[in-house]
Image (spheres, rainbow, N blue to C red):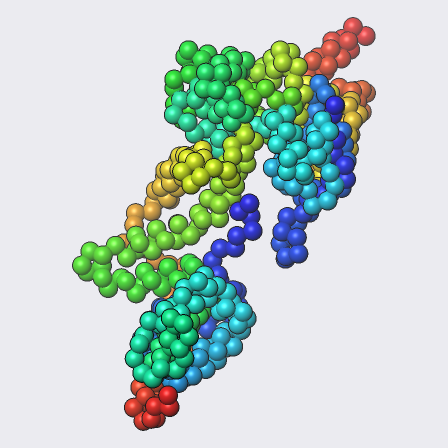
Amino acid sequence: MFKDITLGQYVPGDSFLHKLDPRTKIMLMIAYIVAVFLVQRIEIFALVIIFTVAVTLLSKVSITYLFKALKPMKFLLPLMFLMNLFLIKTGDLLVEWWIFKIYSDGLKNAFFIVLRLATLVAGTSLLTLTTTPIALTDGLEKLLSPLKVIKFPAHELAMMMTIALRFIPTLIEEADKIMKAQLARGADFESGNVFKRAKAMLPILIPLFVNSFRRADELAMAMESRCYHGGNGRTRMRVLCFTWRDLVAVLVMAALIAAIVISQKLIPAVF
Amino acid sequence: MPIIVEKLTHTYMPGTENEHVAVDNVSLTINEGEFFGIIGHTGSGKSTFIQHLNGLVQPTSGKVTVDGFDMSDKKQRQKGRALVGMVFQYPDYQLFDSTVLDDVAFGPKNLGQSEEEAKKSAAEAMKTVGLDPELFGEKSPFELSGGEKRRAALAGIIAMKPKYLVLDEPMAGLDPSGRRDVVATIDALRRELGCTVIMVSHSMEDVARSAERIAVLNEGKLYALGTPDEIFSKTQELIDMGLDAPQTARLAEALRQKGCDVPESIYTNERFIEWFRGLKHV
C-alpha cells in the first residue's frame, strides 16, 4: 500500500550543481526567491525562465522533475489564475459575458501571479533535486551555527532533521506491516464517514507511536553508548568547503539579479 | 476443502529498476487439518507467499483459493479472509488497545460480534493460549513480556476462530521458555480446535518437530515439497541454501561424513536418542 511512495526527490548525479557546496545552494535559493520577487513586469519573467531552464539543463536533471514539483499546485495555480482574472476590476474592459467581466489588469495579473508561483516552486525544487538530504542538513547546520552565540541549537536541529529523514522509510514500512496485521484481524479502513474512519486509524496509529517511542529510546541509548554528547568539539567526516564552483555560481546569480533590476529600469513596458 | 495455490507469482514494483520477483510460479495445496511447514532463507519469498493466503497482497499472476473462495475477488476475499487467521512475526505490530482483553476482542468485534460475545470469545482464546483472563485481562498489552505479548497476539487471532492458522516466524526472538510456551500453545490449538496450522520459519528445528508436510522456498521458487523424512534427507542441500538445519540433523550429517552409518530419517532429538540407545544394545 505504501510501497510505491518515493521519498526525497534527490536525483543522483555529478553535475556542476550537484558538486556545489550545500551552503551555497541554500543561499542561492534564497537569492533566487528574492530575484523572482524583484520581477515587477510580466515580460521580465523571460529572464527568470531562461535562467531556470539553463540551470536545469546544467544539472542534467530531467526537466520533467520540475513539472512534477508543480504537480501539488495543480489546484492552487488555476484557482489563483481565475481569482485574479475575475476579481481585479481595473484597466480596460476586455470581455463581458453574463456576470463575468475581464479587465486588462486582471488578465495581466493572472498571468503574473501564476508565473511567479510556478517559477518560484520549480526553481527552488532544484535545490532538493540536486542535494542529498544529509548534505542539506549539514549545510543548514553550518549556516545556522553563527546563531549559536545566542544559544540557538543549530547542531541539535540538524541532528533532529537527519534522524527524522532517516526514519521516514522505516516508519512507512512499519505502517504497512501494522496495517496488514490489523486487516488480518478484520479491521476496515475504507468504509464509514470521516469520524468512523478516523477512529479506525487508531489500531494503526497506537502501535506506530508506541514502536516509535521505543525506537527513539533505543536510538538515544545507542548514540550515548558511542559517546555522543551533542555537537561541541565534534569533527566531521565530510568537511564542507567552498571551491571555484561556488564563486562562479554566486557571480551568475548576481548577474541574474542585476539583469532583472537593470532591464526593468531601462526597457520600457511592453504591456 | 483445502487451500489451493496455483502458479502463484508476485512481483514487487513491476516495470521499475527495483523490480523484484518475490514469489515465482509456486503451486501447492494445503489440506484441511494438516500441520504445514514452510521454510526458507530470509528473502526467499515466504512472507510474501503467506500474505497471499489471506488476500493481504494480490498475485501478479496465478490464483489462490481458500475453500473455494477466490482471494483475488473482492467479495469472495472477505469470506476467505474470515477463514484464515494470520499471526505476524512481531506482536508489537498489532497490540494497541488499553487492555489485553479489549485487544483480543478487536477481531471478533470486527466480525460483527456484540461487545459481550466478543469479550467471551476473547476470554476463551486467552485461556487457550495460556493467559489467564482474570490475571491478564485488565493489564495493558504493553506491560507484557515478549512471550506473553506473542501469546496475546495469537489469542487475538484465535478469538476469530479461523479454520486455517498462519503463523509467521512464531518463535523468532523468543527465549527458550517463550519458545516452549508457543510450541505448547500450537499443539493445544491443534488438539482442541482441530486447526489447520501453516507455520513459516527460517529454522528447520521449529518445523521439524511437528510439521506433517514441509515446503522449502528458495529465491521465490518452490524448491522441495514433502514429508519431513523426505525433506530432511537433503540436510546438506538445505544447509547450502543458508537454512538453519536442526542441530540433531547436523550432528547426524557430521557423523555420516566421519563414516558412521546414521540413517537419514534421524533429525529430531527423540529419534536420535532412540537410535543411539539401539546402538548400545548391538
User: Is residue B126 visible to us here?
Assistant: no
Residue B78 in the image: x percent, y percent?
A: 61, 32
User: Is residue B168 visible to us here?
Assistant: yes
Q: Residue at x 52, y 77 (%)?
A: A57
Foreground residue among A117 and A100: A100
Q: Residue at x 35, y 77 (%)?
A: A106
Judge whether A116 appears above or below B67 on screen: below
Q: Is residue A16 left or right of residue B166?
A: left
Quadrant that contains the C terminus of chain B: top right
State the residue lying farthest toward the top.
Answer: B281
Residue B109 in the image: x percent, y percent?
A: 49, 24
Report the label total. 0
Q: Residue at x 37, y 60 (%)?
A: A138
Q: Residue at x 42, y 16 (%)?
A: B137
Judge whether A14 appears above or below A195 on screen: below
Foreground residue among B109 and A136: B109
Judge whether A54 appears above or below B29 on screen: below
Q: Is residue B27 left or right of residue B118?
A: right
Quadrant that contains the N terminus of chain B: top right
State the residue lying farthest toward the front.
Answer: A98
Foreground residue among A105 and B174: A105
Residue A261 in the image: x percent, y percent?
A: 31, 86
Residue B233 in the image: x percent, y percent?
A: 79, 26
Judge whether A236 appears above or below A269 on screen: above
Q: Quadrant of residue B160?
A: top right
